[in-house]
Image (spheres, grey):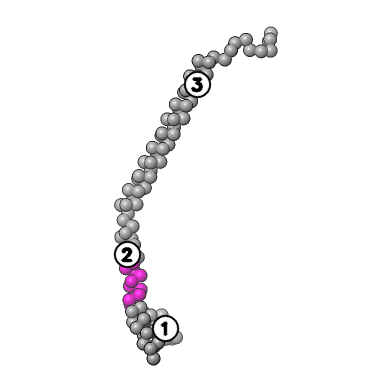
Amino acid sequence: MSSGYEKKDVSVKGLILGTIGLVLLIIVMVVFVRDYFVYNMENAITESAVNNPAKDLMEIQKAENQLLTRFKVIDKEKGMYQIPIDLAMKLVVQDYNK
């Protein structure tokens, strides 16, 4: 038969040990997750340094420089040609001075 209430108090020792265990588990998990992200960040930085983005930039600049310093036929029927930018600037100055 039930008396409608608990006859024993809560175990304070068990409650304290459970709380301490939970706090320790949370601390261990936080340290693990932090170390995991730091490790991955260091690998990403190392990998990007190995890929040498400066070399990629130099290749892009070289390709752009070639576009600016060469002659090219754009549309022969319309008489459209690409000339080096230095020559184009000189022609604009000469045309302006006339």
Which numbered mark, 3 or 1, is in the foreground of this view?
A: 3
Figure label count:
3
The amino acid type, in three-letter code, at marker 3 is Gly
Q: Secondary structure at mark 2?
A: helix
Is 66 magenta? The answer is yes
Residue found at x 32% / y 59%: 54
**Left or right: 22 with respect to 48?**
right
Query: How far is mark 3 from mark 2, CA to CA?
Result: 61 Å
**Left or right: 78 with respect to 72?**
right
Residue found at x 40% / y 87%: 96
- Nearer to the camera, 61 or 80: 61
Q: Which mark is residue 22?
A: none
What residue sits right under mark 3 in the picture?
Answer: 18
Judge whether 38 appears above or below 25 on screen. Answer: below
What residue sits right under mark 2 in the picture?
Answer: 59
The amino acid type, in three-letter code, at marker 2 is Glu
What residue sits right under mark 1 in the picture?
Answer: 80
